[in-house]
Image (spheres, grey):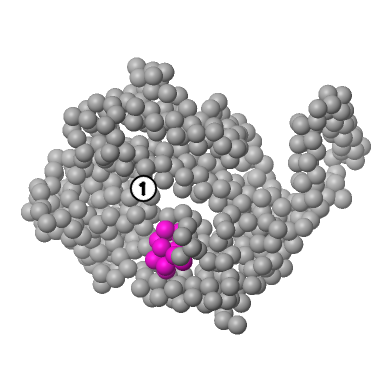
């Protein structure tokens, strides 16, 4: 039996009966088996061409052994590039890609992939999912469900009375013991139960984000084929969003989750409780790293709920860009509608507080433009980069230096700090080489504008500088090469420039 087939079969217990749904995917077991085989020696990165070749060979082994692998609707198998780029990079965000100075590319494991592999290893080795806290969680969920759906009003009332009586007995026991801890409780099992339940959430969010990404692509295609007025097309986007969230069981459940996670008072209370839990003496048998993972998981769960909302905003921005390239007259017609669309998402989804409905629920006709102001030229993390020019174009238009002077991303300071660490002390480095070697998460398109602004502040003659290719990433993680002025950076200049900017 080959190594990858053995890895696949060893994961049967991990995924059996949904006990540990790491990715919530039909091909989750294949994903974990492949990743464990490819990166099982402790490495976390691999040249892209080597990765494609190895994935192709491993898929052959799994397929020939009769194990479940990725297939198209017509039954044909996905090739290695489709699995790596479409599934692992875009859908589940397990891998990141960067361009090496040699011009070759490499893929590396993202934190999500490392967490998946660690969870699979822990569960497969010695962690017991079946515990009394897990059974108590199931019993509580079933009891609550039966209370809600029971047609007998008296029985429903009796359930609620019983719940109150149980709480009163627990309170009486607490008072009688002088506030001593419950000797029958198992804090470690309860801790791991909560951690396991939270680990299942990110995959659900990824599925919703994937659906939104598909909607965005379909809508952009419709701009080039549909002759309806602009308002109808944008309204159609809202309708599709309503259908996704209000018209399906999954969407309605997700809306309810967003409503709870958007409650700032509840978030503050639970965050305080989580911090107390991680410092509790009752969990002293757990190492500090394992205890800290609870707080990281909770923070990731809360921040992750804005991912779908931000993706909707980003989809709208992409729609705006598509219109601009398509027809300037049509763009003017869409502008006021898109302003409303941006602000509906931002005002309803990202300002905190509970959400009464889906953030995209309000139609354009009922949204009050007068109370929602959005400047397309605002200095903001939401702003698209100014038009430099794509590196692979035949003609090279003039760069708009004045726009470069104005724009800069919200994370430019963090990017400069990373660049400073990249340059050897007392030495210098070409900006493009230093930039392309950084983590993909920080190499956003808009940050290139911030770097050019910074170079201008250092007195670099950007207008006369030669050009180089900067490997940037857009909001969905796709690699987008841009051609921009090359700048030679001296570490001391970067340090002094940052200090002057802070001052």
Q: Is residue 437 left or right of residue 467?
A: right
Q: What stretch is highlighted in magenta?
A: 77-89
Q: Tell me the quarter of the picture where residue 494 sits.
A: bottom left
Quarter in which the N terminus is drawn: bottom right
The image shows a total of numbered marks equal to 1
**Residue situated furthest right in the rendering:** 176
Q: Is residue 78 magenta?
A: yes
**Foreground: 198 or 276?**
198
Q: Position of residue 5 (x, y in %)?
A: 58, 76
Say if residue 262 shows up in the picture. no
**Foreground: 404 or 346?**
346
Q: Position of residue 358 (x, y in %)?
A: 51, 30
Task: Kindly state the secondary structure of the residue where label 1 is placed.
Answer: loop
Q: Is residue 102 left or right of residue 351?
A: left
Q: Is residue 176 left or right of residue 143?
A: right
Which residue lies under the disc numbered 1? 475
Q: Which residue is drawn at 49% across and 75% down?
A: 60
Q: Which residue is drawn at 19% across and 53% down?
A: 390
Q: Which residue is drawn at 85% across and 44% down?
A: 180
- Packing grade of label 1 (10 A; few <14, some 14-19, many >=20) is some
| Secondary structure, magenta segment, majority class | helix
Instruction: Please say if 129 is above or below 147.
Output: below
**Foreground: 416 or 150?**
150
Quarter in which the C terminus is drawn: top left
Q: Which residue is drawn at 87% across and 24% down?
A: 154
Instruction: Please say if 331 is above or below 417.
Output: above
Q: Where is residue 373 in the image (x, y as percent from the top left)?
A: 33, 23
Q: Position of residue 171 (x, y in %)?
A: 86, 34
**Residue situated furthest bottom in the rendering:** 1
Say if residue 271 shows up in the picture. yes
Q: Tell me the quarter of the picture where residue 383 sits.
A: top left
Q: Is residue 133 left or right of residue 346?
A: right
């Amino acid at each position: 039996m080959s190594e990858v087939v053995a890895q696949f079969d060893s994961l049967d217990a991990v995924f059996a009966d949904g006990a540990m749904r790491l990715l919530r995917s039909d091909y989750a077991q294949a994903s974990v088996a492949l990743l464990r085989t490819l990166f099982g020696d402790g490495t976390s990165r691999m040249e892209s061409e080597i990765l494609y070749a190895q994935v192709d060979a491993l898929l052959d082994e799994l397929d020939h052994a009769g194990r479940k692998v990725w297939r198209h609707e017509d039954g044909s198998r996905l090739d290695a590039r489709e699995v790596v780029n479409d599934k692992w990079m875009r859908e589940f965000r397990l891998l990141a890609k960067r361009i090496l100075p040699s011009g070759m590319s490499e893929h590396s494991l993202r934190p999500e992939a490392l967490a998946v592999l660690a969870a699979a290893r822990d569960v497969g080795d010695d962690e017991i999912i079946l515990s009394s806290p897990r059974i108590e969680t199931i019993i509580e969920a079933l009891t609550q469900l039966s209370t809600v759906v029971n047609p007998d009003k008296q029985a429903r009332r009796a359930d609620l009375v019983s719940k109150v009586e149980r709480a009163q007995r627990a309170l009486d026991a607490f008072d009688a013991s002088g506030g001593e801890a419950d000797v029958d409780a198992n804090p470690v099992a309860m801790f791991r139960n909560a951690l396991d339940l939270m680990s299942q959430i990110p995959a659900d969010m990824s599925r919703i984000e994937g659906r939104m990404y598909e909607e965005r692509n379909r809508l952009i295609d419709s701009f080039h084929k549909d002759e309806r007025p602009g308002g109808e097309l944008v309204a159609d986007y809202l309708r599709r969003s309503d259908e996704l969230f209000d018209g399906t069981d999954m969407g309605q459940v997700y809306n309810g989750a967003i409503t709870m996670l958007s409650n700032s008072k509840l978030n503050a209370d639970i965050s305080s409780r989580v911090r107390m839990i991680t410092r509790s003496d009752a969990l002293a048998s757990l190492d500090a790293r394992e205890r800290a993972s609870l707080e990281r998981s909770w923070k990731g769960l809360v921040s992750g709920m804005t991912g779908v909302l931000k993706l909707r905003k980003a989809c709208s921005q992409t729609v705006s860009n598509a219109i601009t390239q398509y027809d300037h007259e049509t763009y003017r017609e869409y502008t006021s509608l898109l302003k409303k669309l941006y602000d509906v998402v931002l005002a309803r989804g990202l300002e905190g507080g509970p959400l009464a409905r889906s953030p995209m629920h309000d139609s354009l006709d009922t949204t009050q433009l007068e109370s929602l102001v959005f400047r397309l030229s605002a200095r903001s993390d939401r702003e698209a980069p100014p038009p430099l020019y794509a590196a692979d174009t035949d003609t090279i238009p003039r760069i708009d230096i004045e726009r470069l002077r104005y724009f800069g991303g919200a994370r430019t300071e963090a990017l400069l700090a990373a660049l400073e660490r990249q340059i050897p002390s007392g030495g210098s480095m070409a900006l493009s080489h230093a930039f392309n070697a950084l983590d993909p998460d920080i190499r956003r398109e808009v940050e290139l504008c911030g770097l050019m602004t910074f170079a201008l502040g250092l007195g670099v003659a950007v207008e006369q500088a030669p050009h180089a290719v900067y490997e940037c990433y857009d909001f969905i993680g796709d690699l987008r090469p841009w051609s921009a002025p090359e700048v030679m950076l001296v570490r001391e200049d970067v340090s002094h420039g940052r200090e002057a900017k802070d001052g």
